[in-house]
Amino acid sequence: MIICLLILGSSMQSMLRVVLFRNTGADKNNVIKSMLIGENLTGEKNGLCTLYKSERAGRRISVVEAPGWHGHSQQTPENIKEEITRSVLLCPPGPHALLLVIPVKTLSEEPSVGEINAAEMHMELLSERVWKHTIVRFACDEGVEETTIRKHVQSAEKILEKCGG
């Protein structure tokens, strides 16, 4: 994962800025560890967002975790939109990429259309242009069968098309 993200910026840039979008219940630690190569996962809280920083190969990496699309029932849609906007503002002058993490459910579970729709609506709180800068990552535990992963990818086809492929 880190190799793909490092390529996004030119070799002249000394900083990489990424905003992470995920379901609140998804395992963020594995995603963030893979991006920051196991660095200390103590982040700086700012509202509902968390900012993580690291340095690798002379490049500073900032990962902002935006609020997830489940688990903030006490927040109004306006508050969530404000926090999502904050996540982008914590990466001045703006993120190089938005990483959308879609969890792949366990062996017996079918892909959740509700989960996919919630992710899509969450991202579009920023704007329709967000998709040009979005990378989708399907996250699963070991032991999940390839057919299960394929089902999840197929259920997210609409989102993948918006990202350009």
Image: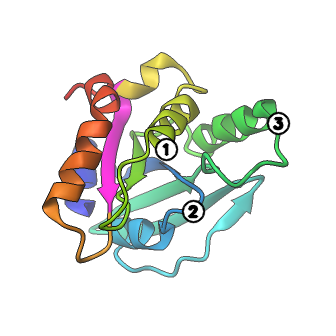
For label 3, the residue is 76
In primary-sequence order, the first of circles 1 and 3 is 3
Spot occupied by residue 159 in the image (x, y as percentages of width and height): 35, 30
Write down the region rendered in magenta. Answer: 132-139
Q: Nearer the viewer, residue 1 or 56?
A: 1
In the picture as drawn, the residue positioned furthest to the top comes out as 128
Relative height, residue 41 to residue 125 (above, below): below
Mark positioned earlier in the residue sequence (2 or 3)? 2
Q: Classify residue 136 as left or right of residue 149.
A: right
| Magenta stretch: includes residue 134 | yes
Circle 1 residue = 115
Task: Please state which amino acid type lies under the numbered disc 2.
Answer: Gly
User: Is residue 93 on the magenta stretch?
Assistant: no
Label 3 residue SS: loop
Q: Is residue 117 above or below residue 148?
A: above
Q: Quarter of the image for the C terminus: give it.
A: top left
